[in-house]
Amino acid sequence: MNPTDTAFIIVCAALVMFMTPGLALFYAGMTRSKNALGTIMQSFASLGVITLVWIFWGYSLSFGTDMNGLIGGFDFIGMAGVGMEPHESIATNLPHMVFMIFQCMFAIITPALITGAFAERMRFSAFIIFIILWCTFVYAPLCHWVWGGGWMAQMGAMDFAGGAVVHMSSASAALAAALVIGKRKGYGKRSFLPHNLPMTMIGTALLWFGWFGFNAGSALAANGLAGNAFVTTHVAAATAMLAWVFAEWKFHGKPTTLGAASGAVAGLVAITPAAGFVGIMASVIIGLGAGVLCYFGVSLKARFGYDDSLDVVGIHGVGGIWGALATGLFASQAINPAGFNGLFHGNPGQLWIQFVSVVATCAFSFVVTYVLLKIVNAIVPIRVTEEEEEAGLDVAIHSESAYQA
């Protein structure tokens, strides 16, 4: 056990935890004022609910003994065998419980990301049931496939910090949710402008800050690889922010703060799978691609007619896919000997492996999420009534108001 690594990962876990409240502010500022608290509450509910799911069975299903490449075993149910000593086959430089809680923070924020797709219209009780099922039947299997020794890991797919596990999975689930739950009342006929962009900018800053723990911490040690992931994360976010701003400046005439926030998050999403496999110049290209591709990606909902309220599909979906494929292009064993070279370093087969992982992740998450939402809707209505939606979730569901007259 390495005390320095242990201290580093504890701090990184705290940074990743901080991302979920940051996401709450990022999303809440983009909603109408009558739904600000309801949106924040969904992220905070994920902090509570998913923590318990994780310690009782989620962690075991993700990192327990591999069962045919599909799911983890029951080794760690109820935290059995998860203590202060390292596990013989899981991050042997860290106390087992430190690795567990670091991974817990990833599990927490992933279903919180989905909430952007159905903001302003999902019933809170249905949301609670949904995230319990989703973490169990979507997140845990995907986590095992990629990081727990499952079939994607066996195939050689590279996902340093969650391009597939976190971003593509949540975006595919978001698309399913938008289709099942339907459009907001008046969508396409009335304005749905963000009510508090300073709140969104603060949320963006907290996300950017926490993302250093997200990506650098995925090195699982205080070493040069963590430093590389830190630097590539920042560079990609900065580049993507500028790319998005200049794109909207060119095509819409004005640079906006919402564009800057969206671009920064797009860059952070795209670099996530690649941060520990690529160098600084590659991170510039990844950030540039993220800013431009995600800028156009948010227009998909207008083209196809679904109501993804806060652009989860356009940012996390498009950005996650680009990041995964870019890993297959730019990955270098000179950066990380434990990974594989990408196309531009003499290994074209890696791009195909990344493509397969993208298709499998998106298809699995979309289909299972769609089924889970139908099951939840049979238990309790997923969508609030028209009267509750008109009044706003803050008052109708939580009997509170973010702003007093």
Image (cartoon, rainbow, N blue to C red):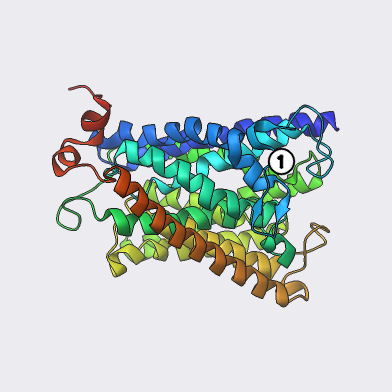
Point out the image quarter for the C terminus. Answer: top left
Q: Is residue 270 above or below residue 133?
A: below
Estimate the x, y position of residue 138 in percent, counting from the top left.
Answer: 52, 52
Q: Is residue 37 above or below residue 166?
A: above
Q: Which residue is drawn at 49% across and 49% down?
A: 265
Question: From where the camera sits, is residue 256 visible?
Answer: no
Task: Identify the residue at the far top of this view.
Answer: 404
Q: On the image, numbered disc 1 is attached to which residue?
A: 75
Question: From where the camera sits, is residue 165 visible?
Answer: yes
Q: In this view, does 236 lie above or below 112?
A: below
Describe residue 317's horizontal placement relative to residue 222 as left or right. Answer: left
Q: In this view, does 375 lie above or below 129?
A: below
The type of residue carrying mark 1 is Asp
Task: Locate residue 126: give its quadrant.
Answer: top left
- Number of residues whose C-alpha sits closer than 10 Å to that of mark 1, classed few (under 14), some (14–19) or many (20 or more): some
Describe residue 218's horizontal placement relative to residue 119 as left or right. Answer: right
| SS class, disc 1 | loop
> Is 224 in front, or is 123?
123
Q: Which residue is drawn at 69% across and 37% down?
A: 76
**For the image shown, how many numbered marks are present on the structure?**
1
Estimate the x, y position of residue 299 in percent, counting from the top left.
Answer: 34, 64
Estimate the x, y position of residue 352 in percent, counting from the top left.
Answer: 65, 75
Estimate the x, y position of residue 191 in percent, counting from the top left.
Answer: 19, 50
Point out the image quarter for the N terminus. Answer: top right
Task: Locate residue 152: give its quadrant.
Answer: bottom right
Describe residue 18's horizontal placement relative to residue 304 as left or right. Answer: right
Describe residue 393's horizontal placement relative to residue 239 as left or right. Answer: left
Task: Locate residue 2: give its quadrant.
Answer: top right
